[in-house]
Amino acid sequence: MKNFYVLLGLLLFVPAIAFSQLSVTTADVSNLIDFDNTVAGVNEGAFDGSGFMMTPVTGQLDADGWAVTGMSDGDKDFGVENTTGDHARGNTDGGLVTTGGMYSFNTSEGVSIGFQ
């Protein structure tokens, strides 16, 4: 739950918006996206901030499952790959962020996704 609050807090301070989709196929079953573990159509392994690919490798988000708007490098639509610039700023490992973009943050609860 802490990851949610970290993400929510970060999103409140930036105009960037990210949309993701998850196919829910069974009723009354929890679906968790924690950015530590693979979720088909969302991410591959622990998110490390290395961008979006149609067939993601460990650390990347699935380009088909995400659209991002409001970045200075431009918008990223569903199905568009991007592994550089604002859409792939890497992992901060708890450090200070000074450049705008999409990051992976290591927290005491695991990996979180955030924006500067």
Image (spheres, grey):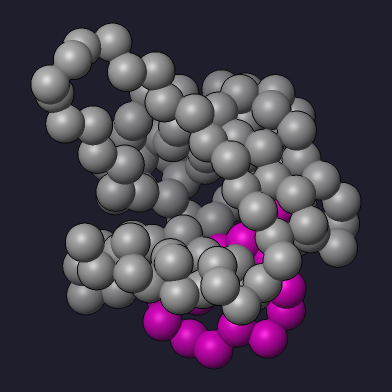
Indicate the quadrant containing the C terminus: top left, top right, bottom left or bottom right. Answer: bottom right
> What is the x, y in percent for residue 105?
43, 69
Considering the whole magenta stretch, tell me its main secondary structure.
loop
Q: Identify the residue at horizontal 60%, vertical 83% (top origin).
A: 97
Please say if 42 is above or below 5: above
Q: Identify the residue at horizontal 56%, vertical 73% (top origin).
A: 12
Question: Does residue 57 appear in this view?
Answer: no
Q: Give residue 94's quadrant in the image.
A: bottom left
Judge by depth and name the residue closer to the eye, 92 or 70: 70
> What is the x, y in percent for residue 64?
61, 23
Q: How many labels does the image show?
A: 0
Judge by depth and name the residue closer to the eye, 113 or 31: 31
* Left-right relation of 43 to 51: left
Indicate the quadrant containing the N terminus: top left, top right, bottom left or bottom right. Answer: bottom left
Residue 95 is one of the magenta-drawn residues: yes
Residue 4 is one of the magenta-drawn residues: no
Q: Identify the residue at horizontal 41%, vertical 26% (top origin).
A: 22
Please say if 99 is above or below 18: below
Pick out the residue farthest to the left: 28
Please say if 34 is above or below 32: below
* Left-right relation of 33 to 70: left
Please say if 95 is above or below 40: below
**Residues shaded magenta:** 87-103
> What is the x, y in percent for residue 20?
53, 36
Question: Does residue 69 appear in this view?
Answer: yes
Q: Give residue 11's quadrant in the image.
A: bottom right
